[in-house]
């Protein structure tokens, strides 16, 4: 990740609505692919330095620190 610039995680977004978190992260780093993922969803285990998964609960609230990966 030496080529990545800026933040790599957003702990301050835990507890906010997922769409707000996505908008915030994209505003800070438009080159990232940012999207919400519902709790319990199955996702790939690959690492991507251009991706941020925003994990949300059944109410659409971020419950895990969004981070690059």
Image (cartoon, helix red, strand yellow):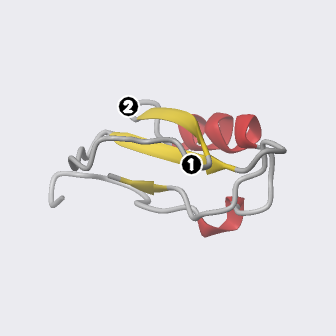
Compared to residue 40, the image places residue 51 above or below, namely: above
Q: How crowded is mark 1: few (under 14 residues within 10 Å), some or many (20 or more)?
A: few
Which residue in the protein does label 2 denote?
31
Q: In this view, does 55 lie to the left or right of 32?
A: right
Foreground pick, 41 / 2: 41
Q: In this view, does 17 lie to the left or right of 44?
A: right
Q: Looking at the image, is mark 1 or mark 2 nearer the viewer?
A: 1
Picture quadrant where residue 58 is located? top right
Residue 56, image x and y in percent?
Answer: 68, 48
Element assignment for label 2: loop
Q: Earlier in the sequence, mark 1 or mark 2?
A: 2
- Residue shown at 56% from the left, 48% from the top: 40
> How many discs mark residues in the rendered view?
2
CA separation in Å, label 1 and label 2: 27 Å
- Residue shown at 57% from the left, 61% from the top: 10
- Residue shown at 61% from the left, 68% from the top: 11
Question: Farthest residue in the left direction?
Answer: 2
Numbered badge on residue 51: none
Numbered badge on residue 40: 1
Residue 42, image x and y in percent?
Answer: 43, 42
* The N terminus, quarter of image: bottom left
Q: In this view, does 35 lie to the left or right of 24?
A: left
Residue 12, image x and y in percent?
Answer: 69, 66
Compared to residue 9, the image places residue 54 above or below, namely: above
Foreground pick, 30 / 47: 47
């Amino acid at each position: 990740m030496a080529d990545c610039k800026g933040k790599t995680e957003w702990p301050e977004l835990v507890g906010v609505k997922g769409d707000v978190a996505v908008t915030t992260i994209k505003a800070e780093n438009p080159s990232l692919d940012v999207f919400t993922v519902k709790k319990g969803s199955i996702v790939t285990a690959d690492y991507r330095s251009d991706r941020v998964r925003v994990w949300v609960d059944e109410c659409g609230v971020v419950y895990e620190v969004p981070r690059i990966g």
